[in-house]
Amino acid sequence: MIQWHRPLYVDENIKESPAAIRRRFRFRKYPGDYYFIIIPEGKDMPEIIKALYLKGQIHRSSEIIIAGVAPGKAQAFDLFAKMAQDAYSATGQVNIRAFLKQQS
């Protein structure tokens, strides 16, 4: 099952609202040029994947939290760094999963 973290980290170069991105995704209109920052089940550190990879059955059957969206891989790494920095500032450690749970 795929869940969306709220508030969703969105790169400033993306003009769509988080609600529009979720709506497109729900109707299987995967934004091919976007990269998602996901936190897979059982892991504390996020992974950066291309949005189209979530079409696969493996990802639909496993527990995934989408925490961020960026228009390119370099921007996704920058967004990941911002998430890690926010987590460290708030909790004193870089456990992004725990930080996001605390934030929700």
Image: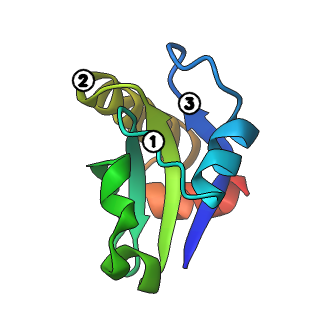
Question: Under tag 3, what secondary structure?
Answer: strand
Question: Label 1, label 2: how many angstroms apart (C-alpha)?
Answer: 21 Å
Within 10 Å of disc 3 (Cα), the crowding (few <14, some 14-19, many 20+) is many
Residue 5 lies left or right of residue 55; in this view the side is right
Splitting the image into 4 quarters, where does residue 54 fall? bottom left
Please give the label number shown on residue 12: none
- Say if mark 1 contacts mark 3, CB within 8 Å: no
- Say if mark 2 contacts mark 3, CB within 8 Å: no
Q: Residue 104 location in percent, x, y?
A: 73, 57
Within 10 Å of disc 1 (Cα), the crowding (few <14, some 14-19, many 20+) is some
Question: Label 1, label 3: how many angstroms apart (C-alpha)?
Answer: 19 Å
Name the N-terminal-most of marks 2 and 3.
3
Mark toward the viewer: 1 or 3: 3
What colour-coding does the image apply?
A: rainbow
Residue 64 lies left or right of residue 24; in this view the side is left
Q: Which residue is tagged 3?
A: 10
Q: Please give the name of the residue rendered at 45% of the width and 54% of the height, measured from the top-left corner.
A: 96
Res. 15 in view? yes
Q: Residue 98 location in percent, x, y?
A: 53, 64
Name the N-terminal-most of marks 1 and 3.
3
Name the N-terminal-most of marks 1 and 2.
2
Q: Which residue is tagged 2?
A: 74
Q: Is 13 placed above or below 80 here?
A: above
| Amino acid type, residue under disc 3 in the picture | Val
Within 10 Å of disc 2 (Cα), the crowding (few <14, some 14-19, many 20+) is few
Question: Label 2, label 3: how many angstroms apart (C-alpha)?
Answer: 14 Å
Most foreground residue, 34 or 46 = 34
Q: Please give the name of the residue rendered at 56% of the width and 30% of the height, measured from the top-left corner.
A: 10
Most foreground residue, 23 or 90 = 23
Q: Which residue is tagged 1?
A: 88
Mark toward the viewer: 1 or 2: 2
